[in-house]
Amino acid sequence: MKITLMILGILLVSITSAAGSPELDSLATEILEEIWSFHPIAATNLGVHKHDTNMPDYSNKTLKWKLSRFKQLQSELSALDTLVLSVEERVDYHLLRASLHDEIFDLETANIYANDPLLYSQSCVVSIHAIMIRYAESIQRKMAAVTARLNQMPLFLETARQNLKKPSYILCDAAINQLTEGERFIEDMFEYYKDSLSQESRLKFRQAKTKAVASMMVFTYWLEKNQAQDGMFALGEDNYNYKLHNIHLVDITADSILKIGTYYLDWTATMIDNLSDMLELSRQEMVTLPSDFGPQSVVQYREMELSDLREFVAGSELVTVPEWIGEIELVETPSFLLGLIPGVAMMPPGPFDRSRKSYFYTPPLPRRFELEDAEYFYNYIYNRWFRGSAVHEAYPGHHLQLSIANSHPSSIRRGFRTFFFVEGWALYCEEMMARSGLYEDTIGALINALEGVRYRAARIIVDVKLQTGAFSYGDALRFMVDTFGGSEAYYAREIKRYISNPIQPSSYLVGKLQIQDLLEEYRELRGNNFDLKKFHDELLGHGSIPLKLAKMLMLSGPD
């Protein structure tokens, strides 16, 4: 899916670099306005609401014009005298440069608009979902924006049919699932909100909804008929390396990343075996299920875990939790996302939205608890299995890190998110919290953290081999099942997500290793003045930027 690095969320009235360079600010305004107007759904997600009533225009004419415009802006940015910029301004400069590389690569080299049906299916459902979860003064305003986007979907999907050439059956399958669930989502939303609208607004919503759902059904049928068994999805090694170097600013190659994945897959297996030998076998106890145990008990447990975890992290000497950090709302993963997100996920607050709330997506619970369900979830609570997920997604993981990033004074910096920082930090937190005293069983917690690293190492192997053509979809599925066992259906959804978002699966472990390398250099530089909490606070305070740039900012010398 489009959106590897995205800096769409800067308000025109307040676009500023970290130190306020007029030349850089002026050019940033132009660059970001071009990106907003090109990707209005991503703008909505980041809390920029001026394009809330628009669907993207990916017509051939617009694609050609945007490519020309982005190249022009790239030339103007390159012409800036970077020698007069402060170190903070140079960071913003590199973020703008990476974002233009991203847009031009997708238009000119990867040509995702001709190859990726998920780009269009996700746009249909996320365009509506983004409006529903972001701030608005009233439900009437939300529904007016939803109606406007629904009205544009038939033309948007007609453009998709004109653009797509031999789409891969794997991506088509994921897109078809999204469209089917998206149709239900739109129908259910209408039923839920129709009574809050005036008669005129309700009629307009119904008419727009009917046409949009019909166009989604037509597009689904078209994908079924036009999916290609030999459709290409792989980037190729050269393109993979280009994205690493020029968009993610990671000085490493696909081959080197693959070696990292292979090494850590083996190393973690050895470490897990060694630690497991140190554990005493726990005595199994028969647990009597309470008669009133059900889905609500699971929800209450998860809410308790989030509250306890925030309190623990805030009281630790690991990282600061500002009082203004927003709340987290636990919600079931929307059905249209389940095909690509089989586990948990965090929808953070938009960096330019008024709300600071995050949404913690969890897979739907069984509506009726059979005995087997009840026994599983009672053990889930008894053994506090949600805690590890909460560390990664909430505190001190995504919710804390992204909320702090949203407060950066540079508008350019606030809206920029790179996988390697965001996912690398969350994985880094898993081991950090395992060593922190959070868990009663430290060795068991370390084993779980290593299991997380092992899984991310396997993701690297799958990601790189899929994108360089060494693995087919079937090869990747067999590798994951053979390595970890378990449900083939789960890995099938995971692998489709890897295919749809190249490099992201590799960012977890590589990003964690980058943070650990930066930590050691920072520790050596500070000497006796080193403070771990200060390191973490400073790191998070720079925003979700490439760690190469964070290193430039943090290793400039002692205070």
Image (cartoon, grey):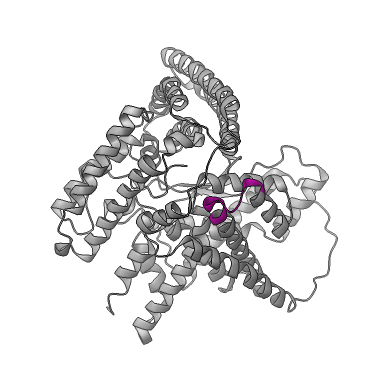
**Residue farthest toward the bottom in the current orientation of the protein:** 528
Q: Residue 287 falls in which quadrant of the image? A: bottom right
The quadrant of the rendering that contains the C terminus is: bottom left
Residue 535, position as x, y percentages in the image: 39, 72
Residue at 78 percent of width and 48 percent of height: 374
Q: Is residue 263 visible?
A: yes
What secondary structure do most residues of the magenta stretch adopt? helix
Q: Is residue 58 left or right of residue 168?
A: left
Whether residue 294 is situated above or below residue 50 in the rendered picture: below
Q: Is residue 351 left or right of residue 330?
A: left
Q: Is residue 397 visible?
A: no
Frontmost residue, 408 versus 40: 40
Q: Is residue 371 magenta?
A: no
Whether residue 63 is situated above or below residue 110 in the rendered picture: above
Residue at 52 percent of width and 58 percent of height: 506
Residue at 33 percent of width and 44 percent of height: 104
**Residue farthest toward the right in the current orientation of the protein:** 286
Residue 494, position as x, y percentages in the image: 61, 48
Frontmost residue, 492 versus 21: 492
Residue 276, position as x, y percentages in the image: 73, 74
Whether residue 123 is situated above or below residue 373 in the rendered picture: above
Residue 42, position as x, y percentages in the image: 39, 39
Frontmost residue, 37 versus 115: 115
Residue at 51 percent of width and 36 percent of height: 118
Q: Which residues make up the magenta segment? A: 464-474
Q: How many marks?
A: 0
Q: Is residue 557 left or right of residue 374?
A: left
